[in-house]
Image: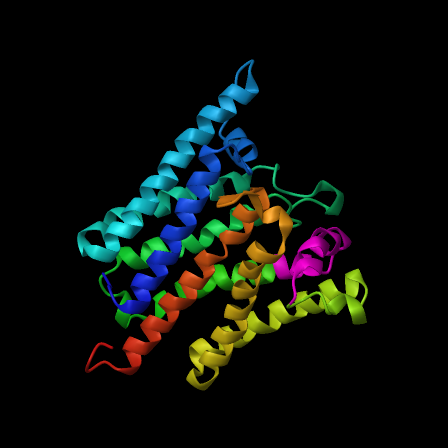
């Protein structure tokens, strides 16, 4: 188990996201819980609101526990393993719901046209982090770089690919227009063209990072290109009015956005492993 500065930073980002998601759930946000737990046949009863409230509180408690473990893991390594096991559990519950039909856009042919599942596929990032934290040899193993690349590459490929569809182009318009970093695109391109350019960037970034895992001189450009995607999405928390339900409490859109911190955690772990591979004598 690793406890370097980069590893601690990755867990701190996870803890922050878990705490904010837990708070939002406690205060009424439900996100995609209905479709996720509907896959498992959860019956919300005659009073569906009351049933969903119960599910929401239970999930909020799980995320709160993960936030506490993430914080404790920064202080003592003995909490890393429980954290890893819990976040793997947190990730697998929604990911398995992808086997149902609720997350797919029927008008675009269903799978792999992803709708509400865009928030669900982000849980692959947690699976990779959890498996890495469980390993005692991750710092020496190239396969753990690939393991943490997979969710990054997958989300950029999948959601980036969706950018070429009209439904996704229109779906991101509000986010893009609110962003001082991206709004300029609409001064030069129409809604679909701007979305296409974002999609092309995502695809180029994931390809360069994949090449960089094999060809070390390209590693940093790949990390920076991919990292820019997820850092930019975090700025939506400050620019997009729909990100917050109230001060300090994420809205549904905010929950979707803050999950991108998990991919930054993946990238930090990749950097840490590569750094340790390059300095085997010191482990730094």
Direction from residue 167 to residue 94 in the image, left or right? left
User: Is residue 78 at least partly visible in the picture?
Assistant: yes
Magenta span: predominant SS is: helix
Depth order, front residue of 238/59? 238
**Residue 57: quadrant of the picture:** top left
Residue at 50% x, 69% y is: 227
Direction from residue 163 to residue 66 in the image, left or right? left
On screen, residue 61 above or below 283 = above
Q: Residue 79: horizontal and vertical position, in percent?
A: 22, 50
Direction from residue 189 to residue 30 in the image, left or right? left
Residue at 65% x, 66% y is: 180
Depth order, front residue of 25/106? 25
- Most extreme residue toward the top is 46
Q: Residue 120: horizontal and vertical position, in percent?
A: 53, 46
- For the N terminus, which image quadrant? bottom left
Direction from residue 18 to residue 43 in the image, left or right? right
User: Is residue 43 at least partly visible in the picture?
Assistant: no
Q: Which residues are magenta?
A: 159-180
């Amino acid at each position: 188990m690793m406890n370097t500065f980069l590893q601690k930073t990755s867990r701190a980002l996870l803890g922050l996201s878990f705490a904010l998601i837990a708070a939002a759930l406690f205060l009424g946000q439900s996100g995609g819980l209905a479709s996720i737990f509907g896959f498992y046949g959860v019956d919300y009863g005659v009073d569906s609101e009351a049933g969903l409230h119960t599910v929401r509180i239970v999930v909020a408690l799980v995320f709160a526990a993960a936030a506490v473990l993430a914080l404790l893991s920064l202080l003592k390594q003995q909490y890393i393993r429980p954290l890893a096991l819990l976040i793997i559990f947190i990730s697998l519950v929604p990911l398995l719901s992808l086997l149902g039909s609720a997350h797919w856009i029927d008008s675009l042919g269903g799978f792999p046209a992803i709708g509400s599942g865009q928030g669900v596929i982000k849980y692959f990032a947690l699976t990779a982090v959890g498996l890495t934290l469980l390993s005692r040899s991750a710092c020496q193993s190239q396969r753990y770089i690939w393991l943490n690349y997979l969710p990054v590459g997958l989300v950029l490929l999948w959601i980036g690919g969706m950018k070429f569809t009209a439904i996704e182009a229109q779906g991101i318009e509000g986010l893009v227009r609110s962003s001082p970093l991206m709004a300029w695109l609409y001064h030069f391109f129409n809604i679909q063209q701007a979305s296409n350019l974002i999609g092309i960037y995502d695809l180029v970034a994931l390809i360069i990072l994949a090449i960089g895992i094999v060809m070390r001189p390209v590693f940093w450009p790949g990390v920076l290109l991919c990292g820019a995607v997820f850092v930019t999405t975090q700025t939506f928390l400050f620019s997009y009015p729909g990100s917050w339900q109230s001060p300090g409490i994420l809205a549904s859109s905010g929950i979707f956005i803050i999950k991108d911190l998990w991919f930054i955690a993946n990238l930090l772990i990749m950097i840490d492993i590569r750094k340790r591979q390059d300095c085997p004598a010191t482990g730094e």
